[in-house]
Image: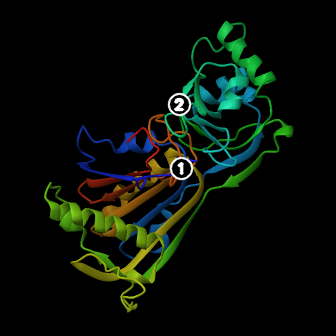
Amino acid sequence: MAFLTEPVQSNLYVSSSSTASPKSRHVQIIEEHPINHRLEILFPTLLSPQQENKFLKEAFYYKADIPLSYFIERSFIQDYLQKGRVVAQSLGEGIDVSNVIALDGSGTLILNLTKDTYEQLGLPGKPAKFGPDRQRFVVQINLLEKSMIPGKKGFERIKWCFDNTLSDPFPFLISYVDSATQETQKITFPPTFNAKKFTIELNFEKLNDIIFPDMEVIKTASQDDHWRSDIVEIYDWFGMASLRTQRIRLQDNVDPYISIYTTPTPYLSGNGSLLCCTGFIPSSIILFLFKSIFDQFSNLNIPWVALSVWGFKDSPISWNKQEHGHFMSGENNYSFLLWPDGTYILYQALGAYDSYS
């Protein structure tokens, strides 16, 4: 048995830009991270019901038992993949121990497989970058290639493998967003898939008597150690706010023996609103909320907003089809700290098993 000789390091990447900059990556960051299960937006003020309504959007997804052969059916490719973004993530025991399948929203089917399954499958792939050497393999299939039509040699090979060697259905979460409307749309499944529809719910919580760090101290990016320390402390504060911990409440007087956490200084006190969203969240919803923040900044009269997104820890990819694993952590999350003038700071948190980092 092998033992770890050093702690496994997760990574936090920080960048600064403006939505007005032609080099800004904010849309790319959101669109290229397709597999998400949680979102929160923190407002440093109490929103009225009318203001809350500006951030509400109906969306849904499905849980269904889907055989891989369904994804290569001509009707599925023409009716869904060619008309919008389909994102899917299989559910199971986890990417370190079982087969995990995903559809990335741009037509690529990703199979992260155990060695035994890969050898039985019979399709070309490559060794996974993470985990024991040559014990996992990755197969990527572009379902939108022109050769993906019945009668073509490559298609027929894939069809035979999906019909004969990897034919059992997988439990999937799946959503379809139409390109024209940017709305989630219905997917028609055969009855045998046991498909169930779930609504993505967006709910607001009120946070009273909160200590807010002064975000202006990090707005101007710098390379000095003080700015680097402040940027991490404020990211830690985001985590404390997400946990709704008493440590960031004005009247907190916890014994230092229990917790030594203190809010970054300088700070202000006040009330806040937290928009919470869980489920299988398509990038289009996140982009809608990102744009809504800037549409409403002037009406809300607030100095900043923080938007945070969590990816599935057992997803086979993080950003831009980059291979992802779990092992000790599996983070692939990001947060935007946004100011009304378009300036933003982007945090990207990644576990050690992620090739994007």
Q: Residue at x 45, y 42 (%)?
A: 354
Residue indicated by mark 1: 327
Give neighbour class at mark 2: few <14, some 14-19, many 20+ (Cα, 10 Å): many
19 lies left or right of 321: left
Frontmost residue, 56 versus 8: 8
- Residue 331, image x and y in percent? 47, 53
117 lies left or right of 167: left
The amino acid type found where label 2 is placed reads: Ser
N-term mark: 1 or 2: 2
Rounded to the nearest whole Å, what is the CA distance between mark 1 and mark 2?
27 Å
Q: Residue at x 64, y 33 (%)?
A: 113
270 lies left or right of 36: left
Q: Mark 1 falls on what kind of element?
A: loop
How is the model colour-coded?
rainbow
The amino acid type found where label 1 is placed reads: Phe
- Residue 9, image x and y in percent? 39, 53
- Residue 62, image x and y in percent? 70, 47
Frontmost residue, 96 versus 34: 96
From the viewer's perspective, is residue 143 above or below residue 216? Answer: above
From the viewer's perspective, is residue 344 above or below residue 89? Answer: below
Residue indicated by mark 2: 106
Give neighbour class at mark 1: few <14, some 14-19, many 20+ (Cα, 10 Å): some
Q: Mark 2 falls on what kind of element?
A: loop
